[in-house]
Image: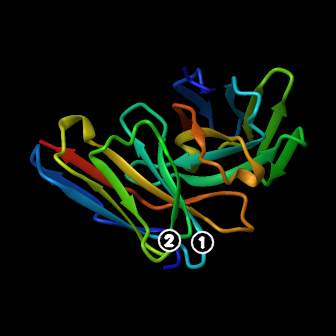
Amino acid sequence: DQQVKQNSPSLSVQEGRISILNCDYTNSMFDYFLWYKKYPAEGPTFLISISSIKDKNEDGRFTVFLNKSAKHLSLHIVPSQPGDSAVYFCAASAGSSGNTPLVFGKGTRLSVIA
Amino acid sequence: DTGVSQDPRHKITKRGQNVTFRCDPISEHNRLYWYRQTLGQGPEFLTYFQNEAQLEKSRLLSDRFSAERPKGSFSTLEIQRTEQGDSAMYLCATKGGEETEAFFGQGTRLTVV
């Protein structure tokens, strides 16, 4: 049973527009959430995170929103750039400050079209 | 380079052979995690260490797999009697006490033929 779900395997967005990537989770014990970006043949690179005590965290063009009651989070990228094209993974942790092992979704491949 | 380093980057081996991978963490990162990623999946947790202590092992870690972190610095992951199903990207991630995110290495891609 997948505890972290990314239901859209792929997403295409025009350059300059907003990209919205979604993630759902089932485990109520998750209290820390992260987004990672992955290029082919490289390891995941950390993008942004959010603690369950917040509902929004922003870092430059990237914003993560958390809806605890719906067990849903989303990553917004504005404006989208061609260099953002990659696979994005949502990950969750049940424990303080994300120390416990991460549970990942299957990823969403984002293509930003110039 | 002060990032997480994994060696080798690629490994092709014949079924039944043993393989060993190495991970060198970011200096002073006391937590070290091993994950495995197969095509179309996200990384799946295998095992993790706090310093030299192995704190948790996933059900994915069969008895053919063993991991060590003898001095609390680098770690090795060994797979004995490899099977074709072991073909995957093996990722190492490390985390310090203050950071909230884990930093990943570039991974070791294993192909069992």
User: Marks 1 and 2: CB-CB under 8 Å?
Assistant: yes
Q: What residue sits 40% from the left and 44% below the top?
A: B36
Q: Please tell me which residue lies in front, A6 or A87.
A: A6
* Residue A27 located left or right of residue B92: right
Image disc number at residue A92: none
Q: Which residue is mark 2?
A: B25
Q: What residue sits 33% from the left and 40% below the top?
A: B62
Picture coordinates of residue A88, whole percent (x, y): 57, 40
Q: Which residue is mark 1?
A: B29
Q: Report in which chain the residue with disc 1 lies.
A: B
If the image is split into quadrants, where does the C terminus of chain A sit? top right
- Which amino acid type is marked by label 1? His
- Which amino acid type is marked by label 2? Pro
Find the distance from the CA under tag 1 to the CA under tag 2: 6 Å
Picture coordinates of residue B51, whole percent (x, y): 56, 70
Picture coordinates of residue B19, whole percent (x, y): 21, 57
Q: Quadrant of residue A21?
A: top right
Picture coordinates of residue B83, whole percent (x, y): 18, 39
